[in-house]
Image: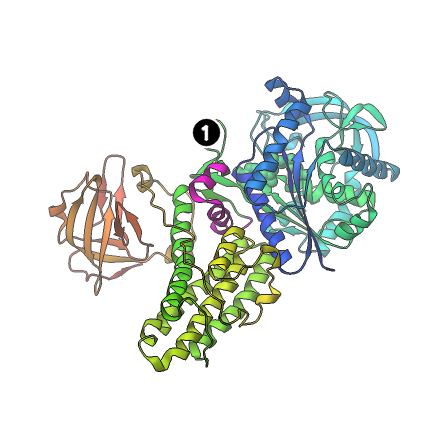
Amino acid sequence: MDKKFFVTTPIYYVNGEPHVGTAYTTIAADVISRYKRLKGYDVYFLTGTDEHGQKIEETANKAGLTPKELVDKTSPKFKKMWERLNISNTDFIRTTEDRHIKAVNKILKKVNENGDIYKGNYEGLYCVSCENFVPKNQVDKDELCPDCGKKLRTVKEESYFFKMSKYQDQLLKHIEENPNFIQPEYRKNEIVSFIKQGLTDLSISRNTFKWGIPLEIDNGHVIYVWFDALTNYITAVGYENDSEKFDKYWNNSEVLHIIGKDIIRFHAIIWPTMLMSAGIKVPDKIVAHGWWTSEGEKMSKSKNNVVDPEKEIEKYGLDAFRYFMLREVNFGVDGDYSQQGIVNRINYDLANDLGNLLNRTIGMVKKYFNGIVIEGEGEDNFDKEIKALYSQTLVEVDDYMNKLQFSKALESIWKFISRMNKYIDETAPWTLAKDESKKSRLAVVMYNLVESLYKISVLISPFMPETSIKMLNQLGLNEKIDNLSIEKIENWGNIPYNIKLAEPNPIFPRIELEVKEEEIIEEEQNFISIDDFSKVKIVVAEILQADNVDGADKLLKFRVSIGKKERTVLSGIAKYYKPQELIGKKVLFVSNLKPVKLRGILSEGMLLTTVTKKSIRLIEIDKSIENGTEVK
Ligand code: MSP
């Protein structure tokens, strides 16, 4: 394999345990690693733990442990969590390992030999939580960290400095000449304007605490934790002692760092300037993702709302969790982790769209051909259409994956899944089955369905590896994850005739979630664009019937007319109205909301209401306006 790919996650601080935020970066890196393997790349995938520094030392002190005891206790929890999440990393690095300490000493020596280290005094503010020196002009009189909001400390100590300012122009030039170096674009722009304000030199040693790598040239100092931590990326690929490996995975590889938006300055400024000084190639790409909130709020231990991946996996299953995280938000922007959000994704995308396509297909092949995929003849327009869409899907997916636009890649795959569900309706196999002369056509339709499912299994395998294997097994294909490849699914017609499908078995059962009243009346705080708004279809509806719902004292059930069609809808307004008084009223109705089941009843839209703390009122419309009239 001559195509090499080296991908890294940040190394995680071991003062806390893994959570949904750290899981997110790691899953993203796993997905791109698996995709690159499907594309035939030799992949080195690195993750690990960041174990030195003042924060770790203080956390250990508070816990009554030595720093070494703390890091040895917590680091394995990350390793275990990544195993649980089915992460396919090649290496797991710990910054307390000997190989790393040697590599840090080596790069520092190089930087020093290059004349880029000098001794001075640091006097200024420091955030222990971010392990960051914060310039005075970035804070007000309260002296809180502009990034995490915690109280800053005043530090005054002797320190060694790295001449970072010397590399300002070289770095700017590099960013300009390599437009993909920092992504997304808006983050790049932030970095560029930050650099243009003028880089200062960086304090790279501390001498007021002990937990760090001692500076070789002055043992009274330990190396600044970020200088130490960033070096992990080259330690792992043999910078210190394995030049062959280093050539392979650093010098001659596509190098990608995936990080969170909060640590972009360290990666896009400190790291490349360190490398420039040491005469080492800089990485190809640094991609920063957004942050997750939990049910609309910032996650924090004090609010007790930190999402624990372990609990989510227990509730929803591993692959549903992986899928949700990468589908729910575009990589780069912030996202919200909500129970309703993951349940909707499971019910609509996984159970409905994907699960149904698999079940319906296997069910039909069983019914019409005893579970065997037989050869038929001919190709009609529907067949041509799905094949054309498939070719387009492959191109789109590849393009999005290369840009780490995971959500868009999944959207593309799901467009194809929906198209295949539609193909079943268009070709109507149940009608073909009634006519003996259409048997060959029926066989072609079945073949195309099984073929599409094979391709879908491969395309989703980076995101949902276990599901992919389950699907392939149900299709009678005993493939191993390591044998799958994009090359093998490029053309139509890969699966052999006469394979026998296994028993259908639902891969994602639907999930019901109780809706709490607070959720119904929750206020929207985020701005939306006009395009978002125009997606909502609001029409005039006439209430034909209104009833109470057994066992749900807040809900009323309605039958409404929206012109030519009628709909059933539930609304949490039982406290404010008697059902009879509503019949005949004309109200506003959202008609394109995805149906949801509440209390076993399918609610197919939403009645618009005004909401105050005291009351909820329907918005009534003049009775002369026709049912179904659109509101814009
Ligand atoms: N140790 C440093 C990284 C050194 S890399 C050379 C560090 N560690 S961390 O454990 O605090 O954070 C690791 C990553 O987790 C960061 O990329 C950060 O953005 C990410 N996240 C932490 N909380 C998060 C969310 N709530 N949402 C998404 N990602 C979040 O920084």
In the image, is residue 170 part of the stretch drawn in magenta?
A: no
Q: Position of residue 443 (x, y in %)?
A: 42, 75
Q: Position of residue 615 (x, y in %)?
A: 23, 38
Quick one: quadrant of the C terminus?
bottom left
Pointer 1: what residue?
304
Count of numbered labels shown in the rendering? 1
Q: Nearer the viewer, residue 132 or 340?
A: 340
Quick one: quadrant of the N terminus?
bottom right
The region drawn magenta spans 310-332
Q: Is residue 81 left or right of residue 96?
A: left
Q: Is residue 78 left or right of residue 236?
A: left
Amino acid type at image mark 1? Asn
Element under disc 1: loop
Can residue 578 be seen? yes
In the image, is residue 325 part of the stretch drawn in magenta?
A: yes
Q: Position of residue 88 (x, y in %)?
A: 62, 47
Q: Is residue 546 above or below residue 270?
A: below
Magenta part mainly helix, strand or loop? Answer: helix
Q: Position of residue 220 (x, y in %)?
A: 80, 21
Which residue is painted at 72% across and 31% down in the image?
Answer: 96
Q: Residues within 10 Å of mark 1 (few under 14, many from 20)?
A: few
Q: Is residue 174 above or below residue 117?
A: below
Tell me which image quadrant ligand 1 sits in: top right
Q: Is residue 234 above or below residue 435?
A: above
Q: Is residue 513 left or right of residue 390?
A: left
